[in-house]
Structures are given as C-alpha cells and as structure tokens.
Amino acid sequence: MDEIPQIRRYEAGDRLHVQAQRIWLILVAFVSSPTRKSTDKKTITYGELAELMGYPDKRAGHTLGRQLGIIGQYCRLNDLPTLNAIVVNQTTGAPGEDVLLRDGRTFKQEQKAVMAQDWFQFGVPTTGTLRKVWASMA
C-alpha cells in the first residue's frame, strides 16, 4: 500500500489554483445537493463561502475574487454556465463587478443556468488545469 498517496487536505495557505478547486467543490455541492428544494436560496455570499473554506471571519470573502475568476474563466472556456455567478455580495445580492459571464448573459440569467446545470456530469478540474487557466489570465 506504499504506492497509494495519502489524502490531501486543503489548508489556509493554499495557492490560488488550489483554493479555486476547493471553491469549485463547495459551489457544486451547494447547487447540486440532492436535498435541494426549488424554494432554497440560489446564491451564496462571499462571507458564507469564506466560512465554508474555514476562514474564521466572513470578511475574508472579499479576498476570493481571483479564485472565483479562475472558476469563471474555466467555465467559459468549457462553454458552461459560470459557476462563480452564484457568489454574491451580502448587501447588494449581486456578484462582484469582475464576475465572468457568458457573452450576452445577465448575472440573473447565468445564475439560473448554473442552478439548472447537472454539475455531477463533469469531473472536478485538476489543480494543474486551474493553474494553467490562472496563468492564461495574467
């Protein structure tokens, strides 16, 4: 059993592309839960996302823009609804100004498309792939 690597745990100091993968998992779980009802909320705040990532304070949510941008760009490159569109400001209920949307879509249209997508039919993007997406954005 020596050849089987130990499970990797996410940590607070992970690189951006590793944090992006963690966010992908959190957002897919949020929108794809088998217990989700049509009346459940359709968005998650930056602060709630920060808490789910283990940050001790919701204010850390304002630091997640680059990671969410990586996810949005990955979705656009694969012609998927931009998963990052469901992460919103607690006060305005809208995503940040830099959220990536598919061409011709409002954030509300994109959020609807995210909620309608069967995300479990796609594999989780590797950290290597997300690193390449991040490098292409620079």
Image (spheres, rainbow, N blue to C red):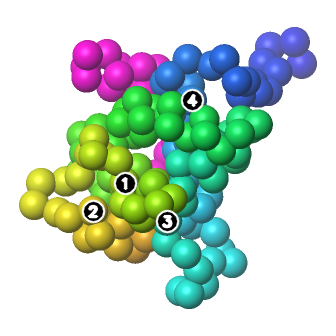
- What range of the chain is rendered magenta? 122-138
- Residue occupied by mark 4: 19
What residue lies at 43% left-to-right and 70% top-to-bottom?
115
- Rounded to the nearest angstrom, the CA distance separating label 3 from label 2 is 11 Å
Q: Position of residue 97 (x, y in %)?
A: 27, 46
Residue 27 lies left or right of residue 14; in this view the side is left
- Point out the tag, 1 or 2, that comes first from the N-terminus: 1
What residue lies at 76% left-to-right and 37% top-to-bottom?
56
- Rounded to the nearest angstrom, the CA distance separating label 3 from label 1 is 9 Å
- Point out the tag, 3 or 2, that comes first from the N-terminus: 3
What residue lies at 42% left-to-right and 20% top-to-bottom?
131
Q: Is residue 117 visible?
A: no
Helix, strand or loop at disc 1?
A: loop
Q: Residues within 10 Å of mark 4 (few under 14, many from 20)?
A: many
- Residue occupied by mark 1: 95
Q: Residues within 10 Å of mark 2 (few under 14, many from 20)?
A: some
Q: Which numbered dot is residue 43?
A: 3
Residue type, numbered disc 2: Phe
